[in-house]
Amino acid sequence: MQDKLATFYAATGHLFMHMFAAIYFVIVLGIEDEWQLTYADLIDLWFFGSLLVGLGSLPAGWMSDRWSRTGMIALMFLGLGVASVLCGLSDNKSSLMINLSIMGLFCSIYHPAGIPWVVNMPGNTGRALGFNNIFGGVGIGVGALISGYLIDTFSWQLAFILPGLLSIMLGIALSWHIYTARIALQNIYSSKFSKNPEQGDYLKIIIIMLIGVTCIGFTFQILQTTLPKVIDIRLTEVLALDTAKIGLVVSSIYVVSGIMNYVGGIAADHYSVRLIYAYGMLIQGLLLFVFADMSHISLILFALVIVAFNSSILPAENILLARFAPEEYQSVIFGLKYILSFSIAPLVVFLVARSHTLTGDFYYLYILGGILSTLLFFLILTLPRNQYKPANP
């Protein structure tokens, strides 16, 4: 029962973290009309929130290692819920920016606490990570779908408030299960990752993984931030899309592509995680070059495939990190990863806003993402060949 509850809360936490990190990119389309402000002005309000999603990861990882991963996830649910409700009650730019920043801070908790929690669960690590990662993509999709529907049917305020109340309820439920010992408060460590790399390989691994994490985070953030708007810009006239339909399209992309997380996780249990990571980077990079200038319905298909490859290599990346991280610092290592992965978001928000102001589109950002991913392919191939073959559970 404890394993089932742990799997439920880990997966739901992943879903909610990504839902709250992404819903503003759809909700902003509703605020744009009501407040009569430009898209660039409103997307800038997420700058500090997106920054804190990354910067908060290191202290969240430290607290997870020193105190409790499950306790930190309960705190995340509660904090996200309160912050989202406050966003829905905001009536001006300043209050919305402050509340979005609080939301970003609580979003930072999940990955340094939740991913080591999943990594150390019994069973096949790749499969467990793949299953859990599905819910990250689902979270983005659900956020886009629900917020689009609530905006068109009710108001953008309710698009913040209802998910916030649900998150508070989940935080209370998890806290109760921890209090009644149905979920352990103390951290559990698996022997699957007890063998670390040779000392001489550490510097090369660290440099390559730092660059890899940053590049994959850049691509992820570019796509997550721009997809609602680029569909609005390039396909609204072709397909007669309103906000709800744009939300449905984005939702479908992330939900369907999320299945690739599971496929990637299964592959990581049976094949070289180094090659999975490398070729996943290459394929998404090449696809971005084509996607950059697309303006017909196949744009949606290409977006789905790019997001799918971006998602499918995450289990391989996390296994690479887990196998060289000392177990007592696993959450800190993942905290460092997500500082890089999510701290790139403020730069992306800035570049997206400037790109839209100057060109009305995001062509050059997609080209940059393609170049970075393609170059990284060659770097990853220099990692040690057999060092990270997945261990038997």
Image (cartoon, rainbow, N blue to C red):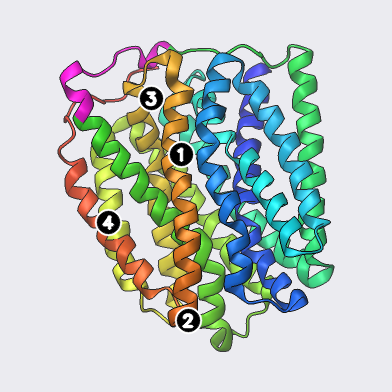
- Residue contact at pointers 1 and 2, CB within 8 angstroms: no
Residue 16 lies left or right of residue 279; in this view the side is right
Dot placed on the residue nearer the N-terminal end, 2 or 4: 2
Mark 4 Cα within 10 Å, few/some/many (few <14, many 20+)? many
- Residue contact at pointers 1 and 3, CB within 8 angstroms: no
- Which residue is located at x 22 percent, y 24 percent? 202
Amino acid at pointer 4: Leu
- Which residue is located at x 48 percent, y 53 percent? 345
- Residue contact at pointers 1 and 4, CB within 8 angstroms: no
- Which sits in the foreground, 202 or 42? 42
Q: Is residue 272 visible?
A: no
The mark lying in front, picked from 2 and 3, is 2
Residue 90 picture quarter: bottom right
In the displayed structure, 392 sits above or below 254; it is above
Amino acid at pointer 2: Gly
Report the residue marked by disc 3: 322
Report the residue marked by disc 4: 372
Q: Is residue 304 visible?
A: yes
In the displayed structure, 224 sits above or below 80; it is below
Residue 132 picture quarter: top right
Q: Secondary structure at mark 1?
A: helix
Report the residue marked by disc 2: 360
Mark 2 Cα within 10 Å, few/some/many (few <14, many 20+)? few
Mark 1 Cα within 10 Å, few/some/many (few <14, many 20+)? many
Q: Residue furthest bottom?
A: 237
The mark lying in front, picked from 2 and 4, is 2
Report the residue marked by disc 1: 339
Q: Position of residue 39 (x, y in %)?
A: 60, 73
Residue 266 lies left or right of residue 231; in this view the side is left
Q: CA distance from mark 1 to mark 3?
A: 16 Å
